[in-house]
Every structure is written in C-alpha cells, then in structure tokens.
Image (tube, rainbow, N blue to C red):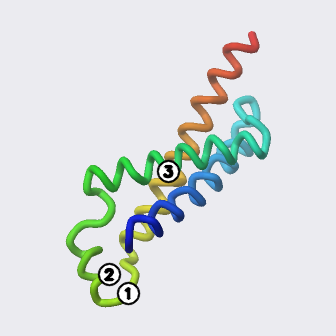
C-alpha cells in the first residue's frame, strides 16, 4: 500500500476513533465536529508514527504492493493505528478542555 493511501485510511480511522471515544466518554467529548478534527489529527499522527517505527508496512507490504494487491496486514495496521491515535488525541484534548473549564 502506498503512503498516501495509508495516510487517508489513517485519517478516516482517526475520525471514527475520535467519535467513538467521544460517544463513550461523554465528559471529554468535544462534540461531533471537534471529535472528528481531533481524531483526524491523531489518526494521521498515529498512522505516521507506526509507519516510521516500521510497525506498519514492512517487507511483506512492499511485496504485496509489487504484486498488485493490497497487503491486509498493512491495511489493518493503518486502521488500528489511526483509530487508536484519534481516540487518544481526542481524550487528551477533552481532558485539557475539561481542566480549563474548571
């Protein structure tokens, strides 16, 4: 899977992860738009960080991409990394917002 497709998947997964975390943690929720924005940023950062560390997209991903297919492991890694990164950043921003409001 090439870099831009992985980034897009991470961004979308991050937005979903941010909204899921906002739905579960009502006190830290930033609203649908805020959750999505924090999730997008967190998902992009999480996906890129995992890719830079070599967790997503190793030799098997390159071999799969050269064969013309999409590497399933890389796809799952991008979805998981983006979703978790989006949720974590949304929670952090929500906690900061909650602390400032007090």
* Residue in the image at 44% along x and 47% along y: 46
Residue 65: mark in rendering: 2
Q: Is residue 16 left or right of residue 88?
A: right
Q: Quadrant of residue 56?
A: bottom left
Distance from the alpha carbon under mark 1 to that under mark 2: 5 Å
Residue 69: mark in rendering: 1
- Disc 3 is placed on an element classified as helix
Which comes sooner in the sequence, label 2 or label 3? Answer: 3
Rendering coords of residue 68 (x, y %): 35, 89
Residue 44: mark in rendering: 3
Rendering coords of residue 19 (x, y %): 69, 49
Task: Look at the image and tell me in which quarter the C terminus lies.
Answer: top right
Contact between marks 1 and 2 (CB within 8 A): the answer is yes
* Residue in the image at 60% along x and 60% along y: 12
Q: Is residue 74 above or below residue 81?
A: below
Distance from the alpha carbon under mark 2 to that under mark 3: 21 Å
């Amino acid at each position: 899977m090439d870099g831009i497709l992985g980034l897009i998947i991470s961004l979308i997964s991050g937005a979903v992860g941010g909204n899921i975390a906002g739905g579960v943690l009502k006190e830290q929720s930033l609203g649908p738009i805020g959750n999505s924005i924090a999730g997008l940023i967190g998902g992009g950062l999480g996906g890129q960080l995992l890719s830079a560390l070599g967790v997503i997209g190793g030799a098997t991903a390159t071999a799969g991409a050269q064969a013309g297919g999409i590497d399933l492991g890389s796809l799952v890694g991008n979805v998981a990394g983006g979703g978790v990164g989006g949720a974590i950043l949304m929670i952090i921003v929500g906690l900061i917002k909650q602390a400032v409001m007090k």
